[in-house]
Image (cartoon, rainbow, N blue to C red):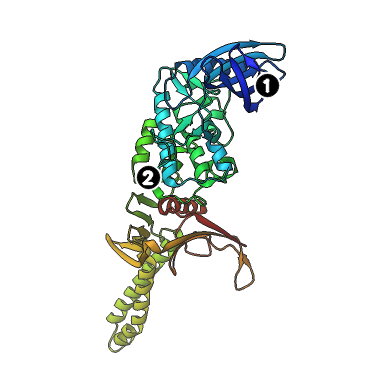
Amino acid sequence: MNSQILGDRYEIQQQLGKKAGRRSLLARDLQTEELVVIKLLSFNSDFEWDDLKLFEREAETLKSLFHPSIPRYLDYFEVNSLSLKGFALVQSYIPAQTLEQYLKAGRSFTEAEVKEIAKELLSILIYLHSLHPRVIHRDIKPSNILLGDAYGGRSQRTGNSPGQVYLVDFGSVQTVAKESGTRTVVGTYGYMPPEQFGDRTTSASDLYSLGATLIYLVTGTHPADLPQKDFRISFEHIANLGPAFTDWLRWMTEPSLEKRLSSAVEALAALNDSQPRITTLALHKPGGSKIQLTKDRDFLEIILPPVGFQSSMVFTGLFAIAWNSFIFFWTTAALAAPFPVNIIFSLFSLPFWGAGFHLAYTLLFPLFKSTGLRLTKQQIAFTTKIFGFQFYHCSSPRQDITKLIYTSYYSSKDCKGNSVKVPTQLEIWAGVQKYEIYVKSIHNNGIVKSEVELEWLAHELSVWLNIPITSRHWS
């Protein structure tokens, strides 16, 4: 199509891109001698009426937008020639490469640069989402974001400024007066939030797509190729980021719409905050768990309930009380006997008194003792709390914490050769000191009731410490 003239005005220079039913062309406006971009929608075998609806919506939307980081609407006309039939949308040309092109060329972005890109795009989204009706892009991804060399009027990049940021391709745009559904599912896999697959998009949907795009920038890996857990993108293990920015990206890409940042204004304010979110309640605490978890920016504390609240322990404790009662009455009866029989029987009962009290102390003390783990900016330590008094032991410097290891044990052999299940455990390594939390079973007195509780605690510690979990499986 090179040198072909469309609309009696636009001379085609080259093709920029192509997908089903659509082409993007670089052309020269013969009236102004400026370069423009022409998007063509062709009536061919791939044509669907929904394509025309979206194309017309894009043209109408661009016509109403006035932002320096969004292409300007220039023209719209019908193409009706022997070789081509369809519609053409003309918009201003921006001499810049896409983020996708930069990444494929091997360019990497620092955390500071990615933050600046995020701020620029959030400013564009604040503009779009504040319009009446609100404009939701629905297809934010690296190939729809341009990065120019000039930034803020300067000819070269300086400091943390990666370049001038532009948002393009409004072919999937949705305009809504209020949050509602849409009949056409559009977007790109890997960048689409879960609700967009269900024909529901809101302002927060664009935030998810932006977050996934930024994750691509900091990892160099397409979001769809990264592992997921509970539908969350797992990027922390390959992204060298600070805890605040890591937490912000998690917040942006929350799969649950209700837990995600709700607006670009809120997202920008959270990004400018240099601290991670304060969380005082765990979002996924297992039902029925008696473990107490409290955390904020400066400390995290886990309080485990007394391990003695088990029927077998209570029964044994009651047995100890009964045993001491028996020895008490035995000794009383012995003292009432004639001398020297009373002295002999009293001395004979003393070891039983001692054994009874020791048994009662050993078995009943856990009923009133709770254990825990406390982490601050300075240290990690086990804690013991009894009758309102808290004691710290086995402490280590917090900066020495380097590993979280979640180990799944399935079976082992006892001394008789029988197969038994031994506990799943979480190891927290601080230098050479190991802190263990493990699941109790019929073969041990572990301190966590179930594997679900242990997985929850492992996740909370991983997020707070910004340390990935290493999984290990032994059988």
Give the left or right position of residue 222, taking residue 260 as reference.
Answer: right
Residue 464 position, x and y percent, is 40, 51
Q: Residue at x 30, y 85 (%)?
A: 342
Residue 104 position, x and y percent, is 58, 42
The amino acid sitting under disc 1 is Met
Mark drawn on residue 281: 2
Q: Residue at x 48, y 23 (%)?
A: 71
How far apart marks 2 and 1 lie (CA) works out to 61 Å
Task: Report whether residue 61 is seen.
Answer: no
Q: Residue at x 41, y 60 (%)?
A: 307
The amino acid sitting under disc 2 is Leu
Query: What residue did someone put label 1 on?
Result: 1
Disc 2 crowd rating (10 Å Cα; few below 14, some 14-19, many 20+) is: few
Q: Residue furthest bottom?
A: 340
The foreground one among 82 and 32 is: 32
Mark drawn on residue 105: none
Residue 410 position, x and y percent, is 60, 60
| 253 over 244 or under it: above or below | above
Task: Report whether residue 442 is seen.
Answer: yes
Q: Quadrant of the C terminus?
A: bottom right
Disc 1 crowd rating (10 Å Cα; few below 14, some 14-19, many 20+) is: few
The foreground one among 415 and 33 is: 33
SS state under label 1: loop
Residue 191 in which image quadrant: top right
The foreground one among 339 and 452 is: 452
SS state under label 2: loop
Q: Quadrant of the N terminus?
A: top right
| 457 over 386 or under it: above or below | above
